[in-house]
Amino acid sequence: MARFVKEIRAERVVCLTATATKKVAQDICDAFSVNESGLFRTTTYRPNLRLHVKSAATKEMVYPGLFKLLRERPGSTIIYITTQSQTEELAKKLRGEKFNAKAFHAGMEASVKALLQDEFMASDNMIMVATIAFGMGVDKSNIRNVIHFDIPRSLEGYSQEIGRAGRDGADSLCQLYLCGEDLHLKESHARSDLPSKESVRALLRDIFDAESAQLKPGESIERKLFHQSKEFDIRSTTLGTIYAQLELRFNLIRASTPRYEGYSYTIHTPAIIQRDQTRQATAIRTASKTAKKWTSIDVDAAAREAKLTRFDIISKLSEWGASGAIELKTSGVISVYKVLQALPSTPGEVDTIVDALYIELEGREKQELDRVQDVINLVTGCRCFAQSLVSHFGDVLPGGKAECGHCTWCETHEEVQLSTPKEVPWDEKRFRAVLEAVDARDDARFLARVAFGITSPRVSALKLGMAGSGGVFGSMADHEFAVSIMLMVCWEELGTDFCAETPGCVYESLFGGESTWFEQGSERG
């Protein structure tokens, strides 16, 4: 974005963010050449927000306290929860307790979400049980409670979410429930984006194939990211990160305007179409193929045949669509990238980029895990929660005070204890069941995803998360992910000679002693 601003010679630029640490703010200033006088910060401390935390060993132990809190503190409330299915489950449970509760998540139709948001904005006693999809654009002054039913993913997210409470200045409660059962769920979310190194290698070999290697700077590469995501088992967000790194870090390709692969339409006013005698209209009529309802057109073929540009054809279709003469439908986004310099053309050159990229992706995974740990450290520490939170963003409490006086720590001066689940002994039977149910042996991380219950394009394509798939998806979610993936690697290397009765013996036999997967992971890829 900073490079784009320079290229268009923007006269003025305003960079806005709700939460930024000192480092992030400085990075933004450096990227956009903003001097110190151009940086404005408002305090992140809100004196009317009471930051409270309660710890429980299981979710079942949370419910009585949650119901009691909601009865004692009526008013507009947001309860943040991690997964879409959980929003529905908790909202139903609350309705069973006679609360006015609704669920909200990204999987709902846009029209349904809009109605729910309008209802919440108009109500004074509605409880919205939502994923973090609910919040942007919600500027309701009298939200009395913001409750985190699960551990937030980061301090930045926590700060933004509690910031939706008490905008009228009245006393408001920000309650966080700290439960050991959440830790595996949070770990799976943090680890969900990292593909295997082989997947990244296969992707880059597809991007920089023999045809691409012949391209000169200024020419373009076209790729269907939706298909790449499925073919190489890489989530769309991670795929976007990889392409961004190829531009920003390696300066190889640069994102250009994407285009649609398919255009089809159905005619509402035939007379308008027939009266149009422009070259574009004639080209469209000639190249179109009509099926039962929709008429399809290859816009590139139509443009070539009529010696027009693609833009000419699309502009005419858009014009008809805007006038109501046709209903226009597009499909299949094709991403376009301009070549910036000679592209890697040998396996060795591609592998060098893969190695550097994968270190970056592993670092991002670790950052996600660290962000969750930052939240846990804040609410289990021997320090005022508000003071810890504002200091994370380089801020201080008013007057330099050490304590806010109304968070859980300030009210009790007792540490909140995280009740972690008991360590689960290694389950050889479940491990073998995963191997028997999943034929794939080309990607150990994929097997670990299945065992741990982490979705991916490949998991979805094989329908491993659906009922009737053997029940192995997520069957080892109560185990350590690092152990799960390590043992999948061991199986891949040692096959039927491998015995996984205890993780410790595998560590010792493979690595010569007790060692963590993360320490060994960089060496083994």
Image: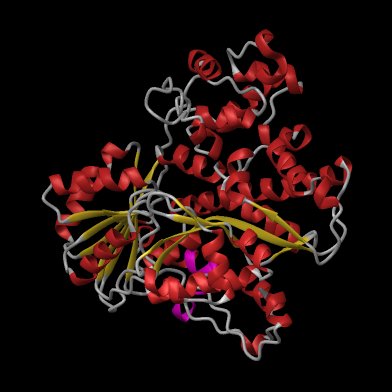
> Magenta segment range?
389-400
Left or right of 143 on screen, residue 374: right
Which residue is located at x 64 percent, y 26 percent? 486
Q: Is residue 438 something that shows in the picture?
A: yes
Q: Position of residue 213 (x, y in %)?
A: 85, 51
Which residue is located at x 65 percent, y 9 percent? 496
- How many numbered marks have been drawn onto this rendered protein structure? 0
Which residue is located at x 56 percent, y 17 percent? 435
Q: Position of residue 443 (x, y in %)?
A: 65, 29
Left or right of 501 on screen, residue 165: left
Q: Nearer the viewer, residue 255 or 234?
A: 255
* Quarter occupied by residue 221: bottom right
| The stretch drawn in magenta includes residue 210 | no
Q: Is residue 394 something that shows in the picture?
A: no
| The stretch drawn in magenta includes residue 395 | yes
What sort of colour scheme is used for the picture? Answer: secondary structure
* Quarter occupied by residue 92: top left
Left or right of 131 on screen, residue 93: left
Q: Position of residue 164 (x, y in %)?
A: 35, 69
Q: Residue furthest left?
A: 98
Q: Nearer the viewer, residue 82 or 513?
A: 82
Q: Residue furthest top?
A: 497
Which residue is located at x 43 percent, y 50 percent? 291
Q: Quadrant of the C terminus?
A: top right
* Quarter occupied by residue 510: top right
Q: Quadrant of the N terminus?
A: bottom right
Q: Position of residue 382 (x, y in %)?
A: 46, 55
